[in-house]
Image (cartoon, coloured by chain):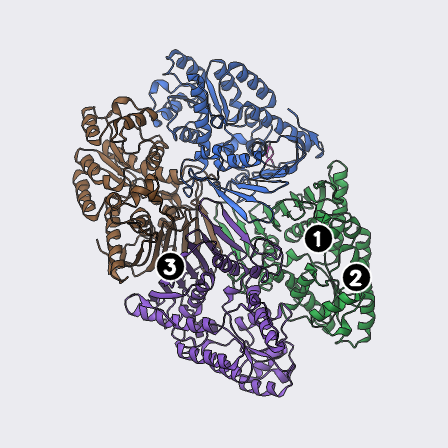
Chain colours: A green, B blue, C brown, D purple
Amino acid sequence: MGMIGGGRGAFIGAVHRMAAALDGEIEFVCGAFSSDPEKSKNTGEDLYLPSSRAYTSYDKMFEEELKLPVGERMDFVSIVTPNFLHFDPAIKAVEKGFSVVLDKPMTLDLEQAVKLNKAVNQSGQIFALTHTYTGYPMVKQARAMVAAGEIGTIRKIHVEYPQGWLASKLEDTDNKQAGWRTDPKKSGMGGALGDIGTHAANLSEYVSGLEISEISANVNIVVPGRLLDDDVDILLRYNNGASGTLSASQIMAGAENGIKISIYGEKGGIEWRHRTPNSLYFRLPGQPEQELRAGVEISYLAPITLKHCRTPSGHPEGFLEAFANIYRNFALTLRAKLDKTSIDPDYSDFPGTRAGVRGMAFIEKTIESSTNGGSWLPFVI
Amino acid sequence: MGMIGGGRGAFIGAVHRMAAALDGEIEFVCGAFSSDPEKSKNTGEDLYLPSSRAYTSYDKMFEEELKLPVGERMDFVSIVTPNFLHFDPAIKAVEKGFSVVLDKPMTLDLEQAVKLNKAVNQSGQIFALTHTYTGYPMVKQARAMVAAGEIGTIRKIHVEYPQGWLASKLEDTDNKQAGWRTDPKKSGMGGALGDIGTHAANLSEYVSGLEISEISANVNIVVPGRLLDDDVDILLRYNNGASGTLSASQIMAGAENGIKISIYGEKGGIEWRHRTPNSLYFRLPGQPEQELRAGVEISYLAPITLKHCRTPSGHPEGFLEAFANIYRNFALTLRAKLDKTSIDPDYSDFPGTRAGVRGMAFIEKTIESSTNGGSWLPFVI
Amino acid sequence: MGMIGGGRGAFIGAVHRMAAALDGEIEFVCGAFSSDPEKSKNTGEDLYLPSSRAYTSYDKMFEEELKLPVGERMDFVSIVTPNFLHFDPAIKAVEKGFSVVLDKPMTLDLEQAVKLNKAVNQSGQIFALTHTYTGYPMVKQARAMVAAGEIGTIRKIHVEYPQGWLASKLEDTDNKQAGWRTDPKKSGMGGALGDIGTHAANLSEYVSGLEISEISANVNIVVPGRLLDDDVDILLRYNNGASGTLSASQIMAGAENGIKISIYGEKGGIEWRHRTPNSLYFRLPGQPEQELRAGVEISYLAPITLKHCRTPSGHPEGFLEAFANIYRNFALTLRAKLDKTSIDPDYSDFPGTRAGVRGMAFIEKTIESSTNGGSWLPFVI
Amino acid sequence: MGMIGGGRGAFIGAVHRMAAALDGEIEFVCGAFSSDPEKSKNTGEDLYLPSSRAYTSYDKMFEEELKLPVGERMDFVSIVTPNFLHFDPAIKAVEKGFSVVLDKPMTLDLEQAVKLNKAVNQSGQIFALTHTYTGYPMVKQARAMVAAGEIGTIRKIHVEYPQGWLASKLEDTDNKQAGWRTDPKKSGMGGALGDIGTHAANLSEYVSGLEISEISANVNIVVPGRLLDDDVDILLRYNNGASGTLSASQIMAGAENGIKISIYGEKGGIEWRHRTPNSLYFRLPGQPEQELRAGVEISYLAPITLKHCRTPSGHPEGFLEAFANIYRNFALTLRAKLDKTSIDPDYSDFPGTRAGVRGMAFIEKTIESSTNGGSWLPFVI
């Protein structure tokens, strides 16, 4: 694995590295951590890389790595830059024969996403988008239970993603995270919508197995002077006729990173909360609520869930493990491709280009609905 | 107190009686429990009333009670019939000089509500509408904290009221509750909207001190063949510019009676959940979340909160106590009127006709918005 | 009902009155609220009693009430005085033909308890001791499930009762509650042990259906200068060979009234917490934890549980309702006796003299074990 | 790092490897995974080790690794074998100049522990014992708050460690974990006591900063025919006069791995539960309970806590991260030693030989007290 971005002090770069390291399936061999040569070199040293493989640009990295023999060169690149720096390295990577793990959202806008999608498909490279929440074992369990019909035909989906860290105008301080995430040139047209709204939309589609088909939205800039939305409420319809809501906000002062989803069908309901990620709540009328728990030995879990647990029940796993599940599956899928072997489909379960393209379209369509007075708009892509 | 409705087997009648009895401030003296003379008489016996005061109609009850001397006759009437039987006994009661406690929603439609409002105001009688959730001590605490500016100017309100008991077509069985609540002739034009949506709207306005000013709604009939809505999702704007959502549903199979509200302002947020009614969660950025608790001795609670607690912290109070707070306050207010004394305003804090009229208008406007493709409609009354 | 004690400002007297009033089965007709005639009179007025029936002593009350015709006179007396004033009014009441509801613990010492037990049995009067926690519906459910063998033969019982209100030397202030509860002359030889330890012991025996048979204890006076224990930890053995712990403390600074019990058998376990009294947690190996909920309509509950619920699930009931269940059952049992009818045994389920005698013996034996270096002592009575 | 034990299918070996890999500070270079050459080789292949460094015995591993140049050879060994195979490889490792990470409990008996302690001290090697729970950030926060006097002088400690996996006689099946853990020859004289009781005792001492000074215990074999204890309840006194309880059980059918500790002092109390490891509950009289949360950006956390978080609040960390904190600190401490640099003491915070020796003595003293009828025994080492 080589990394693009993720220099000293970058939160998400460190997360990607820990996630990639956890399962011992991925060797971290090089990086273009920063356009500042000194900084890239220092980061490389921090990470015990040979100085020759701490590059000053991803173009250079692609060029030099291709000179190395297969087996020694990096097999894939992990791109952890801000949104506006997703498209160019990603499309170059696949065109040059590297597989890609890309932080979400996919690109700066829908047009780029469509192009990248096409390029990935033509290249035959493996591509993963880190919609982390789909990596949690109990999210996979929820999906499996819905697919097995345990709650019946879905009628209702509520998903919410509250955060509070942008409740004040943090972008006016030297906070780098706040800076680029509220800057349309670096983030694209969605603020909270792109940063966390796409996670919520992706989660609802992943667990339900449905697709959002209509949107009626209220997109707000709550903090005065901010350039991008920081709060959205959306009414949704899904392609089976189910309805629901999606709320994502970064101005809920004092709130944590509390993504949560509840889905109700004709027969019952399930609920998953990031706050207690190793539990899944299952409700059937006239029966006690059940709390299903993650754990390698839990016999009532679906096979796919068990394959994404590392510890026995009662040994909590968290965000890094969910992230690592995406990396592990990506690595196994890539290895199967390289080795020309087949792979258990449960291990190739990670978000790809379709999730990415839908995410970018979701941003644009939500803003369009809100701009048009909240009227219902069809969402098809 | 006299009661109209609430014959044997009626859930809400028994709740009203227990709530009225709890604090020893109200004597239960008569009732017109049923239009069936035998049933009314039997209910009277069950309740240890003299047979002479178990009436066969509320008209009869008004007539006979007026013959009794003041002090012996009932001072007020508690009306616990289905919605379509609210307006007539209520307006007659106030016109004949009785105060009224009325189950919500106020009437069958907005027109009746406006008329009743006028009649109550002209009569000078005391009138309470049992929006129970405003009777909980920690809901009053939430209102007091918001009013004191502890979370700053409100930006965001999310309120939800999930129920699951109408997930199947229960009205086709002999379930009386389901029967009248899904029947437009008995309930009015709102189903879940009137039954629980009005509770949620009232709670949001009570706690925030704001008023809903715009509505963009999606009103659903989920169970095929049902005549009234059983599920609504609403985007809201409030009169200070805050926005939010309101979801109320009776088809969330397996869900309990889980009304919940969270409000975020510039400075922080609060959350109250019916599931844990004696707690209020308070969040400020950069500080640990606090769990405030009800209890007569808790020094950090607002004076109004303490006046609505009966037990020390750690001794849970519940639904009946919240209900009893409305009755207790109503009784104290009525006694002050009768005794021509003044009353601590904290004790005259209960929902009245304005809440009732706004509730009926909320039902109509929500349906109008949904019918008009979810477009935003102004809500002013 | 007549009341002894419970003058203005007394916490537990008000609780008894609300509990007695809730279900409309008991008429409150007289009281000897205080040895101070003025205070007793004022309390009577507060409670809307005729001045003739606010007595200045319980002896006077017994005398005068007996002059009234049956049906008008009080049928039973509720005794809510400090421990040292339990025995005399209680034994006189039963000897004069009144039934009794008595606050716990039963008496000042075991000797009194044994005498009172004998007197009650000889009198044929109905006697209830307010071990409130056994009045909670989900505690009854726990007992029913254990009795039905749902967790198999019991192996392990942990019960804890943490409070924090005596973490400082509150008895040196003018706090009346703290004053008498830490005074051996008024409370007897147990402090926390008598006040809350007996609740915990009673709860463990009630739910398990077992009896404590051996005690190894550590009884502490933590706050310097206090005269009675304020903290105890006890190892227990039960009469089927099960073992466990009981901790009761009033010095856990910041803790609420958090009684909690967990019981494990060969097949599974249950847990009930006062903090969430309407839930019962049920665990079986290899299955998701279940959260059983109180509610009049919950079909999986035992018949006895349903008979002690007043509201549908999701409408929380609390401490007063649990207390009211004892009063309601006591009233129904007394009425059956007066009416010479039979009664459903589920409605005569309330703690009586045996619970009281065992509680007093538990206090004495626990202190004896602690004094003897924590050695195991047999507990048989 | 080299590993001893941890062949295919061993739970704890995989945990150690993931924990060591997470932070990118440790390179995994060799192992003696099994005494079966084939199995050791296969495990090495699974882990992408060169076949030359998958050894068939730890003696061989020590010998061969010592032939390699410093920098290439392993710096330390991670020992993840059953208890009876701790002492020999550990003492040989330190004597040959390797540092050691050792799974707990330290050895088979106290005598071995004392010897190993001496050998480690003489060798100057770095030694870590994986009492995992002390690696959780909020456990470190608890310790820091106690040390800072935020709850005042400690009066009371309750620690419990319930498990249910040995509720039936699992050792009669082919479950390897159950087999050796219930076998005195492989586990030593403690069953549940050694496996989880030592964790609980260590946690109580770590957080409180106190030492257990007296023990009154009840040690049980609940499952008939089992050879080692599977359930213990212990009354404890600490060296400042505080008292408390410790319960550890593996027969609580249906229970998870729910270690939990609550500590109360003169001023307030704290509680940490493994079920919600990223939260710490803090109680002060007269104030709302606070829920402190882990997270790299949480300003109210102690410096040592922040150094053991990897993600922002709301991104749950779990068991592997706690384990990794021990490995990370061990690695930094070892590197500082090798580089002859100094180290921030917060990074050298991990359990060492003293914790190990106390753990072994705790097992022996607890059994002695129980055998002697539960009498209090002094505990000094």
Magenta highlight range: B225-230
Q: Are marks 3 and 2 in contact (CB under 8 Å)?
A: no
Q: Residue at x 54, y 17 (%)?
A: B121
Q: Are marks 1 and 2 in contact (CB under 8 Å)?
A: no
**Foreground: A8 or D82?**
A8
User: What is the x, y in percent for residue B319?
Assistant: 46, 36
Q: Name the mark nearer the viewer: 1 or 2.
A: 1
Circle 3: residue type? Ala
Placement of A177 over or under D352, stated as above or below: above
Residue B158 makes an appearance in the image: yes
Residue B10 makes an appearance in the image: no
Say what secondary structure mark 3 lies in.
loop
Q: State yes or no: residue B88 in magenta.
A: no
Q: Are marks 1 and 2 on the same chain?
A: yes
Closer to the N terminus: mark 1 or mark 2?
A: 2
Q: CA distance from mark 1 to mark 2?
A: 26 Å
User: What is the x, y in percent for residue B172?
Assistant: 53, 35
- Mark 1 surroundings within 10 Å by alpha-carbon count, few (fewer than 14), some (14 through 19), many (20 or more): few
Chain assignment, label 1: A
Say what secondary structure mark 2 lies in.
helix
Circle 2: residue type? Ala
**Foreground: A199 or B42?**
A199
Q: Are marks 3 and 1 on the same chain?
A: no
Reading the image, the residue beneath label 1 is A175
Chain assignment, label 3: D
Reading the image, the residue beneath label 2 is A90
Q: Which mark is residue D242?
A: 3
